[in-house]
Image (tube, rainbow, N blue to C red):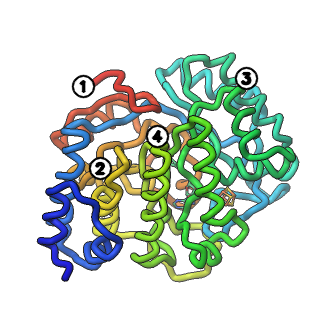
Amino acid sequence: MITFESISAKVHATQRITAEEALFLFKSNDLLAIGELAARANSRKNGAHVYFNVNRHINPTNICVNRCAFCAFSRTAGEDGAYTLALNEICRRARDAEGEGATEVHIVGGLHPDLAFEFYEEALQAIRLTAPRLHIKAFTAVEIEYFSRISGMTVEMVLQHLIRAGLGSMPGGGAEILVEDVRQKICPEKISGGRWLEIIRLAHLAGLKTNATMLYGHVETFADRIAHMEMLRTLQDETGGFQAFIPLAFQTENSNLKLDIKGTTGLDDLKTLAIARIFLDNFNHIKAYWVMLGEKIAQVSLAFGVNDLDGTVIEEKIGHDAGASTPQSLTKEGIIRLIRKAGKIPVERDTLYHPLRSY
Ligand code: V47
Ligand code: SF4
């Protein structure tokens, strides 16, 4: 029989918990006990260190052929608010970011019907020339699959071209919930969960580190969240290529999901982060993305197993188009303060988690 004590004994003995045990935790409202287990699992890996980076997001276009039902960011070409940045504007933003102390640009966008694959290669090459010290973390598995389709190249070839142009790693977007019947409800046009995993696997085999996200708080069940995390855990056992797991709390405004969805609660956010820390024993980092969680829940999550607060971000669009009420960026000092006041040690990192400076 599963009990909290039997799960706790496993975590203390650094044994992996099962999907059934994770479900038991999701059904419990003993948040503090779950948080304590997660904090223990985290401190074994990361001690009191909490990572952040100085980064900037650039979304080259919001024009997208997929138009996922949940996505408030995307537009159809010609629609009000549709935009595509010119190459020199992308470079200007990267150069400014480097000048302001950023070590990373995070680049993701819509699946544009007319831009050729060469546009993306040229964008990376141009960034590398204008801002050579920046690490380029770019393109979700969904974009990589699309590049393969528009270029006629295999996914492996697309990855090789992008690496040669300057790609350093990949973010974790596009995963949503990898379970197929959930995808059919929220993003039927998007590549399948199986294909997302396969592309990430190929990226890991090509030597790229990636993250993995999970969009939660819409139509999915607890069992779906666990199935999602189990698929990631299995792939991580095989490749070791994931750096951080990032649960993304669903922002409800301007979505075309015609459902009565109220958004996540603080209890659900903290429980999800804590259970992720316990369940994903082969991930080094659990990231609280303050943009979607709010700064306060993100800070409190540092006592619930989280060891990464993402970064300064600057000009976040995806969550804000969907009603996120957080600022569009945080200053480095603001992030350091949140971490310090939580009794932890702030460590500025580069994209690959090399510590640059601790405070
Ligand atoms: O793929 C879209 C999600 C993702 C909404 O890897 C939404 O370091 C909440 O992946 N409410 C993009 N989420 C963001 C992302 C990310 C962010 C920060 C760090 C990293 C990383 C990755 O945002 C999309 C989608 O899953 N998303 N709409 C929404 N309304
Ligand atoms: Fe396009 Fe990504 Fe938005 Fe889906 S989530 S509509 S693929 S930008």
What residue is shown with label 3?
Answer: 126
Q: Which comes sooner in the sequence, label 4 or label 2?
A: 2
Tell me the amino acid under the disc marked 3: Ala
Q: Residue at x 49, y 32 (%)?
A: 55
> Of circles 3 and 4, which is in front?
3
Tell me the amino acid under the disc marked 2: Val
What residue is shown with label 2?
Answer: 306
Between the C-alphas of marks 3 and 1, the distance is 33 Å
Tell me the amino acid under the disc marked 1: Tyr
Image location (x, y in percent) of residue 82: 76, 52
Q: Residue at x 16, y 73 (%)?
A: 4
What residue is shown with label 4?
Answer: 329
What residue is shown with label 1?
Answer: 359
Q: Which comes sooner in the sequence, label 2 or label 1?
A: 2
Helix, strand or loop status at disc 4: loop
Q: Is residue 262 left or right of residue 280?
A: right
Q: Are marks 2 and 1 in contact (CB under 8 Å)?
A: no
Label 3 CA crowd tier, 10 Å (few <14, some 14–19, many 20+) = some
Q: Residue at x 16, y 56 (%)?
A: 13
**Residue 270 in view of the camera:** no
Between the C-alphas of marks 3 and 2, the distance is 35 Å
> Of circles 2 and 1, which is in front?
2
Image location (x, y in percent) of residue 98: 54, 21
Q: Residue at x 69, y 63 (%)?
A: 191
